[in-house]
Image (cartoon, rainbow, N blue to C red):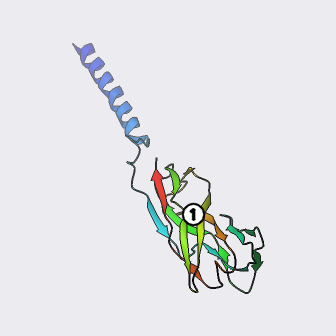
């Protein structure tokens, strides 16, 4: 009878030591990844701006790339004059690893302060679409565009403005 009691205490002691050891070991475990949350898109104060330029009889285009480079075609001459040019900047907040695609809306018509209208085509983005968010903090997204300018008669000097649509799709 005494041997049975000693075996019982011995087994109980081993189980107790194993449980004590396991309770001291810290292992991070996760049941599942966080559920997807809606993306939050913030339009910053940096809006698509083409700066100052002049054009002749033929017209042409002015393009601002998502990296902030400006170029022209046709008889459009880019001017400095202190007028800034830059792509639109969006701040996107989403779970890291979220895949986001960008759908550009149809071309927009920008109306001039002295009459006339020009066509705006939304361009590519940086990072290019689709892209994967890398941080829970704001992920920066730059989008460029191209405006098509006609003759001086069709597009007199002035300020042109309008709105355009960009859709963000969380995949």
Question: In the image, what residue occupies the spot 39% across and 54% down?
Answer: 37
In the image as oriented, which residue stretches furthest toward the left?
Answer: 1
- Examine the rendered structure and indicate whether residue 31 appears above or below residue 77: above
Residue with the mark numbered 1: 140
Pick the residue in front: 12 or 21: 21
Q: Quadrant of the N terminus?
A: top left
Q: Position of residue 103 (x, y in %)?
A: 51, 55
Question: In the image, what residue occupies the spot 58% across and 52% down?
Answer: 129
Q: Is residue 58 left or right of residue 1?
A: right
- Examine the rendered structure and indicate whether residue 17 appears above or below residue 85: above
- Helix or strand or loop: what does disc 1 sit on? strand
Mark yes or no: residue 126 visible. no
Mark yes or no: residue 129 visible. yes
Pick the residue in front: 66 or 72: 72
Q: How many numbered marks, from 0 up?
A: 1
Q: Is residue 11 left or right of residue 120?
A: left
Question: In the image, what residue occupies the spot 75% across and 82% down?
Answer: 80
Q: Is residue 168 left or right of residue 5?
A: right
Pick the residue in front: 26 or 168: 168
Question: In the image, what residue occupies the spot 43% across and 40% down?
Answer: 25
Q: Position of residue 44 (x, y in %)?
A: 52, 73
Pick the residue in front: 159 or 44: 159
Rendered image quadrant of residue 52 = bottom right
Q: Position of residue 95 (x, y in %)?
A: 46, 53
Instruction: Tell me if mark 1 has few (under 14), some (14-19) or many (20+) residues whose alpha carbon lies within 10 angstroms of its own.
Output: some
- Examine the rendered structure and indicate whether residue 50 appears above or below residue 128: below
Q: Position of residue 113 (x, y in %)?
A: 56, 85
């Amino acid at each position: 009878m005494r041997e049975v009691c000693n075996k019982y205490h011995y087994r109980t002691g081993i189980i107790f030591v194993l449980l004590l050891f396991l309770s001291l070991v810290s292992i991070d475990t996760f049941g599942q990844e966080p559920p997807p949350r809606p993306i939050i898109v913030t339009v910053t104060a940096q809006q698509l701006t083409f700066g100052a330029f002049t054009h002749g009889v033929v017209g042409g285009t002015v393009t601002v790339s998502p990296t902030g480079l400006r170029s022209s075609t046709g008889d459009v001459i880019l001017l400095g004059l202190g007028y800034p040019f830059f792509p639109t900047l969006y701040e996107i907040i989403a779970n890291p690893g979220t895949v986001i695609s960008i759908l550009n809306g149809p071309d927009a018509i920008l109306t001039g302060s002295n009459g006339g209208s020009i066509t705006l085509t939304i361009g590519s983005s940086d990072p290019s679409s689709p892209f994967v968010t890398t941080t829970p903090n704001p992920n920066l997204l730059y989008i460029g565009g191209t405006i098509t300018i006609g003759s001086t008669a069709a597009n007199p000097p002035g300020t042109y403005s309008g709105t355009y649509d960009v859709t963000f799709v969380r995949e």
